[in-house]
Structures are given as C-alpha cells and as structure tokens.
Image (spheres, rainbow, N blue to C red):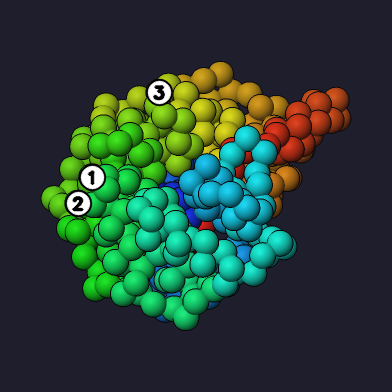
Amino acid sequence: MKRFEGKTMMVVVRGYCRVCSVVVLGVLSVLPLVRAQQKEVSRASACVPSDLAALIVPDGLSVRVSPVAVLGGQERSALEHAENGPAILSPFADRTAREAYKVFEREARQGHPAAMVNLAVSSLAGRGTPPNAGAALYWLQEAVNRGYAPASYNLGILYFKGCGVQQDYAEALRFFDQASRSGDAASEVNLGYMYDHGLGVIQNHAVAASWYRQAAERGEPQAQYNHADLYLHGEGVPHDEAVALAWFQKAALQGHTTARIMLGSMYALGRDTPKDLQSAYLWISAATFEGDTRGRATLLSLETQLTPEQLTEAKLRARSLALRAAPSPNVALLH
C-alpha cells in the first residue's frame, strides 16, 4: 500500500509528490475504501525534461525561478513577473533561455544562492546551455554550503530519483532533513514518505505521521492527504475516521482531487459522518470538473438517488469549488 510521494519536483526555486490512493463508489454498489498505486514513472524520464517550458501547459504549473529581488538592475526584465510572487520563467519571456542562463550564472558567481539553484536546474535541463549534471550538482552544493534550504531539497530530489547521480535514498533523506530544518514543507512531506515506505531508513509509520503532520499544519495539501490516509487505516496513529475526514477536507478545499474523491466517498458511505449523498456528489463532481474522472461511475450512481433540485445545487457548488484558484506551487515537475 502506497501513499503519495511528497513532491517529485525540482525547485526552480522548490518541491516532491505521493502516489494517489483513490476510493470511488461502484455503479450499483459502494466499494470499500482502498488504496491504488499509480504507475511508476520510468527511470528514463526521471530527470528534468530538456524543455522546462513544456511543463507549464500540460501540468498546469508555473515553472518558477528565484524571486525577482535576487536579480539586479535591468536583468529583472529577463523574467516574466508573477503577481505577488516569484518570477516565472516563461516560454514567452522577453529574453531567450540563453540570456536568462547568463543572468543566473553571473548572479550565482556573485554568491546568490537562489541564482545558484536556478543555474543548477537550467544546467540539468539543458535550458540555455548544454545539459551538464556535474555543473548542476556543483551549484546545488554551493548553495547548500550557504545554508539555502531549496538547494538541499533539490539535491534530495536528485538522489531520490537517481538523476545525475547514483540513486541513494540515504543521501536523499539526509538532504531532505537539512531542508526541513528551515521549515520546508515539501521536504517534510518527503521525509514522511520515506519513513512511510522504508526508503533509506527503517520503516516507521509513527515517524512518518509526525513529518506529515508538520507539513500538513503548514498547509501542504499532499501532506494533509497522506496524514488523513494514515488515520483512515490506523498506521502509526490510532484508527480515527473523524480525524481522517477532517484532514481530507482540508486537502480537498485546496483542490487535491484525490482528497475530494475520498471525502465524497466517506460522505456517501456515512463513514464517521452522517450519510450525505448530495455532499458526496458535490465533492466527487468537483474532482471530475478538474479532469479527475475516476469518480465518474460513482456520480452516475448518485444521480439516480438525488432529486433534480439536489443535483442542480450540487453541480453549481462543485463547479464553484473547481474554479477556485489553487495556490501555485513553486516547483517544476521532474517527470
């Protein structure tokens, strides 16, 4: 049984993510709550793609780079500005990838750790420069030496995935632990995942729960989902479906589609909450509106049990939830 990996993402300044578990209702009957593992990402695709920009549209994510403040003078125009957030390295930026690489390189040589991280990711991805894993590792280590948590996180990702280095879970654990000391939620959820599954360390669900909780309390939806799943199955924590429901709801409110399906399933089953088919339909439908179709058969079943008025209201509320903007993660997916 496998929960989500924290974040398999490399920060162009931040990220890792967990393999989904999902519960849906059958067309004619309700299925029990179970976990289903996604396909493993092939080793061949473990490294950053050669075109980071390709991640923006397909995955719905912004490929973010260091905060604009670390760049000096006119170089700021090399990056497309995000409102109230870091700059975004966009395929439509005014400057070429090579020019952006030069900005990162100059700032890195002047000692800016955020620029070092961006230079490392650009080197690994071959964006604006030929791919060079050695250079990526060098600049990440330089940033780590300056106590920069995102660099420790990224090195953890490289060792976890075996990208540019030999896969080494113990080293990944060490770097995630370094980053977690600065309160990095992505590293905390990855530490939880590694203890959860005994990767580079003896399996310990109780320790995993502790790490998940820290990240969950920082608002990390993946950690909230994982923490809920532990309570649902009584692994490392007491079996408590009321607590699981509360954490699934926190993740669901942030747009975590699997949490929405789980929450809907618990409402449909009446698991430690009054049975509420309209709420079940609302949450599973919200996940479907966002492209997660695993609950489609369940929705068809629920439609036969709700009045037209209940369906109309649930659909309107579900669409509103789906349209609610989720926080943009500061990550570039490695796969």
Three-letter amino acid code of the residue under disc 1: Asp
> Going from the N terminus, do you reach mark 3 or mark 1 first?
1
The residue carrying pointer 3 sits among few (fewer than 14), some (14 to 19) or many (20 or more) residues within 10 Å by Cα, namely some
The residue carrying pointer 1 sits among few (fewer than 14), some (14 to 19) or many (20 or more) residues within 10 Å by Cα, namely many
Q: CA gap, disc 3 to disc 2?
A: 31 Å
The dot on residue 174 is 2
The dot on residue 243 is 3
Q: Is residue 134 above or below residue 256?
A: below
Q: Contact (CB < 8 A) between labels 3 and 1?
A: no
Residue 69 position within the rendered picture, expressed as x and y whole percent measured from the top left: 52, 42
The residue wearing badge 1 is 177
Of residue 42 and residue 244, the one placed in the foreground of this image is: 42
Q: Residue at x 30, y 36 (%)?
A: 182
The residue carrying pointer 2 sits among few (fewer than 14), some (14 to 19) or many (20 or more) residues within 10 Å by Cα, namely some
Residue 234 position within the rendered picture, expressed as x and y whole percent measured from the top left: 29, 33
Image-based side of 2 in relation to 119, left or right: left
Q: Contact (CB < 8 A) between labels 2 and 1?
A: yes
Q: Residue furthest front?
A: 73
Res 136 visible: yes
Three-letter amino acid code of the residue under disc 3: Val
Three-letter amino acid code of the residue under disc 2: Arg
